[in-house]
Image (cartoon, rainbow, N blue to C red):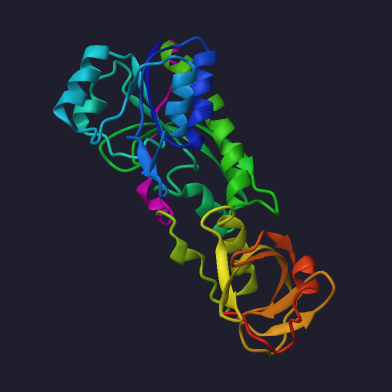
Amino acid sequence: MRVVFMGTPDFSVPTLEKIIEAGHEVIGVVTQPDKAKGRGKKVIFSPVKEKALEHGLTIYQPVKAREPEFIEQMRFLNPDVMVVVAFGQILPKDILDIPKYGCVNVHASLLPKYRGAAPIQWAVIRGEKVSGVTTMQMDVGLDTGDMLLKAEVPLAEDETGGSLFDKLSVLGGELLIETLDKMVKGELHPEKQDDSQAGEYARTLDKALGKVDFSMPAVEIERLIRGLNPWPSAYTSYNGKTMKLWKAKVVPGNDGEPGEILSVDKNSFTVQTGEGGLCILELQMEGKKRMDAGAFLRGCSMAIGERLG
């Protein structure tokens, strides 16, 4: 098939690679404009652009996908299908109507649950036992198009946002190829989404989300820590400095105040929460490297009764 691929972050790259490996003709790659970062304002390419350059593919970087010039460029390419994986812009109907087989999106959740920008992390934060990938025929709504195929993956007890990201990124590429194969053969049976089954909107992550509220139950805080690992990370404060929390486990608590240090041993320390205790196993102090709690305690005289937050 003649494919226009639209994507931007790391998550999109395995799908682009799978399309190339499967022998489809990638006639164009669309990604977000380059960004200048850091003090030196060094220009940074998106991961998808980097991969497209490796393969010598033609790249398009519209500031806005609804620009008439960009729409005309896509019409001129006349693709059989557009594949969209975390592109980062909402596509207008003028774009959706161009390809013979429409625009197919690879979404990192089992739709209709977790529509939105950060379905992977919210699945961990909300304690889902199973997640997965859905290929979807795009419409003008936000993640509301007809579902094509799904693939599930169970979440491990220690699943993080990062580890689930890696699993679903690979799974998404595999599912997309299966979707294209069945599309050509006329073997797809699109299924409308049941809006009544749509879960909480998977809103974009920001750093403020990571601030730990120790009045929450320990089980919810532990999931937050995993879901926001590696970014933006869960955090609190200790002795006036930011403490990022990277790994913890739920343990029995007592009648201490939320945020109060209940116990300190050689390799960990336990904090009271709104329900149960939270044993901190890995952390990172402001300006320091990530370390296990034991290494931190060897250089810090943390005492029972002190407070986090």
> Which stretch did the figure color magenta?
185-203
Q: Position of residue 9 (x, y in %)?
A: 45, 37
User: Residue 183 occupies which quadrant of the picture?
Assistant: top left
Task: Reply above or below: 196 against 168.
Answer: below
**Side of 16 where 268 appears, left or right:** right
Please state, as top left, top right, bottom left or bottom right, where the N terminus lies in the image: top left
Q: Main secondary structure of the magenta part?
A: loop
**Side of 206 where 142 appears, left or right:** left
Q: Is residue 205 magenta?
A: no
Q: Is residue 178 visible?
A: no
Q: Residue at x 77, y 73 (%)?
A: 299
User: Residue 145 occupies which quadrant of the picture?
Assistant: top left
Q: Residue at x 17, y 31 (%)?
A: 67
Task: Reply above or below: 168 against 100.
Answer: below
Q: Position of residue 253 (x, y in %)?
A: 72, 81
Q: Position of residue 212 (x, y in %)?
A: 55, 72
Q: Residue furthest front?
A: 40
Please state, as top left, top right, bottom left or bottom right, where the C terminus lies in the image: bottom right
Q: Position of residue 92 (x, y in %)?
A: 22, 34
Task: Reply above or below: 48 against 240.
Answer: above
